[in-house]
Image: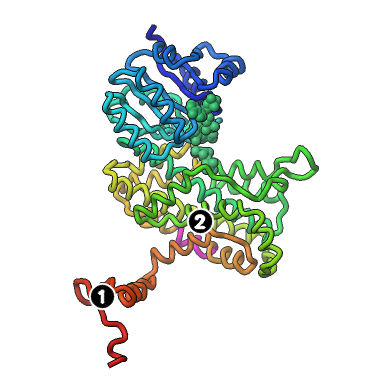
Amino acid sequence: MDKYDIAVIGLSVMGRSLALNMADHGYRVAVYNRSKEVTEAMVKEYPHEGIQPYYSLEELTGALRRPRKIIMMIKAGAPVDAVIGNLAPLLEEGDILMDGGNSFFEDTRRRSKLLEQQGIRYYGVGISGGEEGARFGPSIMPGGDADAYGEIGPILRDISAKAEGEPCCTYIGPDGAGHYVKMVHNGIEYADMQLIAEAYLLLKYIGGFDNQRLSEIFGEWQSGELKSYLIGITADILKEPDDCTTGELVDYILDSAAQKGTGRWTSIESLKQGIDVSMITAACNARVMSNRLQEREKAFRLLKGPDVTAAGEPLSFIRMVREGLYAAKILAYAQGFSLLKDASKQYEWNLELGKIASIFRAGCIIQAVFLNDITAAFQENPNLENLLFHEFFRQGIEKNQGSLREIVTQGIKSGLPLPAMTNALAYLDAFRGAHVGANLIQAQRDCFGAHTYLRTDQEGSFHHDWGKKKED
Ligand SMILES: NC(=O)C1=CN([C@@H]2O[C@H](COP(=O)(O)OP(=O)(O)OC[C@H]3O[C@@H](n4cnc5c(N)ncnc54)[C@H](OP(=O)(O)O)[C@@H]3O)[C@@H](O)[C@H]2O)C=CC1
Ligand SMILES: O=C(CO)[C@H](O)[C@H](O)COP(=O)(O)O
């Protein structure tokens, strides 16, 4: 019987929460999970009149209104291909199959082409916001066949977060565009998190503040230009008591962070495209280095560095860290949006950067007041080459770069690792620098490999017989 509006496949935290969110919005949702016990546990723990469990894909697909709308919320990679393999024979021309997981955008492009042959409209849907977002309103980045958006758009917009009353969901573009944008969202997320971690290191070790005071400082920043979901949770995390001791939990968490791949993909794609996202790459490498625990312990014993120099006047140090963090944050977003701009051209996706920034204003992990300013900048000039060329951000950098330079200098003198902040400055100075030393690199390439060089005073490529005059 054609009675369910949509199906959710995969009932771990994200799928379960999205299904409940859809049902809360009045949709009739059919749910399925590979392992039966997960489905049983979900309907037992979260009973909802709008949700109907199914225990086979045949029954599930048979229960859906045509064209069928199905969203997979499962582990990215081979599992997605496995589910598509089982599901595709049960679908009909016109049905819409969405992948709401963190799939690699090239996989989404491949799957789109494959399913197109069967007339199935495939959608790569980036979803951000974690469990809470999925349950009560995530930021949603759907990419696929534009005509099919009319079928799925209303549901996705209904369940999305709202920023100033507007849904944090917009059609992104064809084939892999939605998953590409989600990938870059996560890349920016990595840089943002790393910058906050570096601000924490500076405040803790140079500033000498305890966890309660650190929590207050991040809490105070929530009333200014840094206000964001990540700063907010950081303030809360820092004062969270430990269950096993009398201290705060953060001090008992291993200094080593994992990554699932989206940040790394962003970095790899940026190298392929030739766009500098050094802060995202630095954030990935910071996690990589954090994982080398045994080597780090050995190096800590063997390699001596400088002693930490305590900060001067506490309030002015806190102000410098806040200003420096803000400048670095502008640079991280400038990098991420440059990558999106280039991808839009390269893949002919026609990405609307203003709309993308606007759907990041709520629901997602990088949501921040700052995204209102980015939205406004791209709305004012949709062809903005780089965020740093917009007056608001140009001034933001002009006003705050001094503090960034100061805290990075203090951090380096004290031997603190600040890879994202350091790369922020390197990016700024290379971008704005009249001289980057590439004339010498051209000369070296021509000298050792006859790769030719370009001149400042004449058109064309040149090769020089290096050292010949001297020998003569
Ligand atoms: N967790 C988060 O905060 C966020 C996650 N995402 C993405 O959303 C997706 C779902 O995430 P999450 O809810 O955390 O769950 P997981 O990424 O942990 O995936 C678990 C789900 O995948 C299913 N699965 C795994 N392998 C297979 C397979 N071979 N065939 C069929 N199903 C399989 C599991 O079924 P079974 O129970 O049978 O093992 C289960 O339903 C992922 O792509 C994730 O990257 C996106 C944003 C935030
Ligand atoms: O997509 C997300 C949020 O938008 C996830 O939280 C993301 O998977 C976290 O990535 P990682 O595990 O690599 O830190």
- Please report the bounds of the magenta region as a residue range: 396-403
At a point 41% along the width and 58% down the height, the residue shown is 394
Quadrant of the frame with the C terminus? bottom left
Q: Earlier in the sequence, mark 2 or mark 1?
A: 2
Disc number placed over residue 456 in the picture, else none: 1
Secondary structure, mark 1, is loop
Whether residue 100 appears in magenta in the rendering, the answer is no
Residue flagged by tag 1: what amino acid is it?
Thr
Farthest-out residue, right? 246
- The residue identified by callout 2 is 282
At a point 34% along the width and 28% down the height, the residue shown is 122
Quadrant of the frame with the N terminus? top left
- The answer to which of 377 and 336 lies nearer the viewer is 336
Question: Badge 2: how crowded within 10 Å, few (<14), some, or many (20+)?
Answer: many
Up/down of 319 relative to 163, above or below: below
Question: Badge 1: how crowded within 10 Å, few (<14), some, or many (20+)?
Answer: few
Q: Position of residue 58 (x, y in %)?
A: 42, 14
